[in-house]
Amino acid sequence: MIDFLKAAGDSPSEYVTHHLKHLQVSVGEGAFWTVNIDSLAMSVALGVLGLGLFWLVGRRATAGVPGRLQAFIEIVIEFIDGQVRDVYHGSRRFVGPIALTIFVWILLMNAVKMIPVDLPPGIAAAAGSEYFRAVPTTDLNITAAMALAVLLLMLGFAVAAKGAGGFAKELFTAPFHADGPVMKLVLAPANFGLNVIEYLSKPVSLAMRLFGNMYAGELVFLLIALLGMAGGNLLMSQAGAGSWIGGSLAFLGAVVAGAAWSIFHILVITLQAFIFMILTVVYLSIATEHH
Amino acid sequence: MDINATLIGQGLAFAILLWFSWKFVWPPLVNAIEERQKRIAEGLAAADRAKAELADADQRAEQEVRAARAKAAEILERAHQQAGQIVEKAKVDAIAEGARQKAAAEAEIASMLQAARSDLRSQLGSLAVLGAERIVRREIDAAAHRALIEELANEI
């Protein structure tokens, strides 16, 4: 009955570590050359699914009266376009699709959290695989990859806006401006250091914020599941009225807490996707600004 | 939680999705939205235009009606005038005709009177002569009395 917990004798810490292990495939020598096939597959599948839907709707989009699906898609597009318009004051030909991709993709990846924590590993176990972590954004690799891509986009936008020379010059002359050539030389290392820190801190904060929120949320879901499991075990042990009451309370607590945390996570899922998107747009906007 | 090659895979997937979304997803949807916005703006402008045209047409129709009414009033006025003139003329004609007929009648009366008078006079003359003859039969001097009788006849 409690098979999906692997074994009733599993300790809570074993349960948690098991659920936090990735399904990995080694693609080369060394620890780096392994791929978390679960998060990558989920991420690619969700990206294809989400943007594929947008693409299908866009392919037969009509400027006349839109159907329900097209109206919904257009609401999303207009929402994103409006947000981008407020923040980024250039052509939205590139920034719009970037924001759309980030928002839709991260939203879908976060939304996998709404699936009960034991279900994906359970299905994987039934399919013969020992581990499966379904929420891609609880994998630092996924969020870091997207944040690094945003860093590359920032650099690309900066170079496109100011030219390679202008960008390089700005790295050494801003934010501290100097008048004389001597002072310029003195301030150049400080400027460069600050700029490097600034450019690096942005993707790090992007990646860590999303990963941290999702990972912590996942942990809490696991703890709630553990509470429910403990309650269930107490109930099953049939060791008198005390175990019955305690087990019921623990189980009920797990149900209430799980529901509350899930409802709260509807907000977190959307908010984190939105924050990642809007910060990306803000960073791109800053990167194109002249100092 | 270790950083591994998943990073590269996800980066590549992100790049491909970005390209796909830039190339195939964003433009048609945004175009459709903008196209519809343009159409709605055009529709609203057309509605405004039609409203203005309607107001214009209303005004013109009112002008036409007013002009027609004025013209009708003018025609009526003229007809009244004409009718008055006709009546007046008829009156004048009638008066003239009346006067003419009256004059003719008077003339006829006068001529008839004249004829009667002369007839009477001649009859009176012969009557007088006859009378005189009778008298003269007793006391004949026709010539002497004739002047007397004619004088008498003229007095009538």
Image: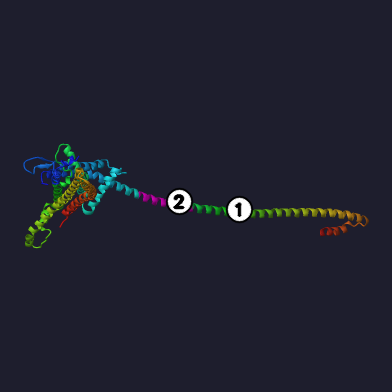
- Please tell me which residue is depicted at 88% across the width and 56% down the height of the picture: B142
Disc 2 residue crowd, few under 14, some 14–19, many 20+, Cα 10 Å = few
Tag shown at residue B61 = 2
Q: Nearer the viewer, residue A236 or A156?
A: A236
Q: Amino acid at mark 1?
A: Ile
Stretch of the chain drawn in magenta: B45-66
What secondary structure is the stretch in magenta mostly built from?
Answer: helix
Q: Which residue is mark 1?
A: B86
Is residue B48 rendered magenta in the image?
Answer: yes
User: To which chain does the residue with label 1 belong?
Assistant: B
Q: Quadrant of the N terminus of chain A?
A: top left
Regarding residue B58, the answer to whether it shows in the image is: yes
User: What is the residue that sits farthest to the front in this orientation?
Assistant: A240
User: To which chain does the residue with label 2 belong?
Assistant: B
Residue B106, horizontal then vertical, whole percent = 73, 55
Disc 1 residue crowd, few under 14, some 14–19, many 20+, Cα 10 Å = few
Tell me the mark number nearer the camera, choosing from 2 and 1.
2
Could you tell me which secondary element the residue under label 2 belongs to? helix
Q: Is residue A211 left or right of residue A66?
A: left
- Please tell me which residue is depicted at 8% across the width and 59% down the height of the picture: A190
Regarding residue A47, the answer to whether it shows in the image is: no
Residue A187, horizontal then vertical, whole percent = 8, 60
Q: Nearer the viewer, residue A207 or B126?
A: A207
Could you tell me which secondary element the residue under label 1 belongs to? helix
Residue A260, horizontal then vertical, whole percent = 24, 50
Same chain for the residues under marks 2 and 1 in the image:
yes
User: Total marks drawn?
Assistant: 2
Q: Nearer the viewer, residue A47 or B71?
A: A47
Tag shown at residue A209 = none
Q: Quadrant of the C terminus of chain A?
A: bottom left
